[in-house]
Image (tube, helix red, strand yellow):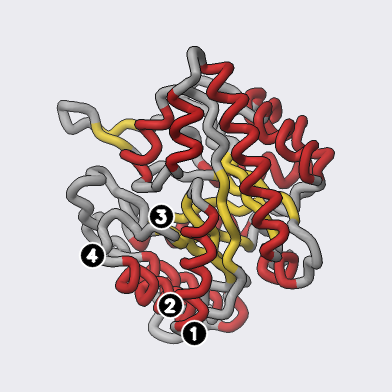
Amino acid sequence: MNIANIIKNSNKPLFSFEVLPPLKGKGLEGIFGTIDPLLEFNPQFINITTHCEQYDKNGKRTRKRPGTVAVAATIKNKYNIPVVPHILCGGFTREETEYVLIDLDYLGIENLLVLRGDGRNKENYQPEVGGNRYAVDLLRQINDMNHGKYIDDEQPNSSAATNFHCGVAGYPEKHYSATSLDEDILNLKAKVDAGAQYIVTQMFFDNQKYYDFVEKCRNVGITVPIIPGIKPIGFMSQVDVLPKIFACHIPTEFETELRKCKCDADAAKVGTEWAIYQANELAKYGVPLIHWFTYSDPSQVVEIAKAIY
């Protein structure tokens, strides 16, 4: 089932969300505990994040989370809901990426979110030796496979063609490594021209940032759906942490209320109310779907969804 077609055919804001694979040594019960309470809202798809392998201080390669492929297959088979694993450039060679894509193809998982990722060092991003540098390069590799062309093949083989459908990330307040929002949007246009069928935005707390971003995208010829990604604030610390990590602006009115909070429960209440406000205004604007960053705690999103769906 092509996620882009689901989005394009909607006449009201649909619901989707994102989960994290469990930490090493943990089972899938935590993921099921995240998904189960959200089923009543008819999620159209579930995104599954990917993390490249990390290295300890001695240079030993470690793995902090189980493979996204296994988690995606488990969710797909248990819930019969389309899954969208994240596929990264950073931290992976083209050969490793091809192996993952072959596995996903065998499992019948056809929808992907294609990302550059941060690799091993967010502050000084470098692609893996032999890896794709940017998401547009990864999209081209996936397009090759969709035409039956693999890394070691001299000629395409149509009988081996995959059928992947790809979305990409957009940044209403620009990606931290871009010199300007205009440059970032031109890079996004290149990804759409390379085959991306829809865009999911990074979290934002100021809807005007999203509206302006959509207008700028349309002005440069990007016509694919642009899905807003929303993260409800649930902890007092996030008023400082999230803008720093994700380079997103928190409106003064919202920040003022958060800084009045005396505990995390107060912050979660304020964050929930703000996310409901955001979602209702986005629905009036006419977004086809709202994507929720639930991570490992569905409680706030359940409360928000009950208020707006």
- Label 2 residue SS: helix
Q: Earlier in the sequence, mark 1 or mark 2?
A: 2
Q: Earlier in the sequence, mark 3 or mark 2?
A: 3
- Asked if marks 4 and 1 touch (Cβ < 8 Å), the reply is no
Q: Position of residue 292 (x, y in %)?
A: 62, 44
Of the residues shown, which amino acid type is indicated by label 1? Gly
Q: Position of residue 8 (x, y in %)?
A: 72, 72
In the image, taking residue 125 as reference, residue 153 lies left or right, namely right
Q: CA distance from mark 4 to mark 3?
A: 22 Å
Of the residues shown, which amino acid type is indicated by label 2? Lys
Label 4 vs label 2, nearer the camera: 4
Q: Which residue is mark 1?
A: 221
Q: CA distance from mark 4 to mark 2?
A: 16 Å
- Label 1 residue SS: loop
**For residue 149, which numbered disc appears in the image?**
none
Of residue 274 and residue 158, the one placed in the foreground of this image is 274
Q: CA distance from mark 3 to mark 1?
A: 26 Å
Q: Position of residue 24 (x, y in %)?
A: 46, 25
Q: Which residue is mark 4?
A: 179
- Asked if marks 3 and 1 touch (Cβ < 8 Å), the reply is no
Q: Is residue 269 above or below residue 123?
A: above
- Asked if marks 1 and 2 touch (Cβ < 8 Å), the reply is yes
- The image quadrant where one finds the N terminus is bottom right
Q: Earlier in the sequence, mark 4 or mark 3?
A: 3
- Asked if marks 4 and 3 touch (Cβ < 8 Å), the reply is no
Q: Which residue is mark 3?
A: 88
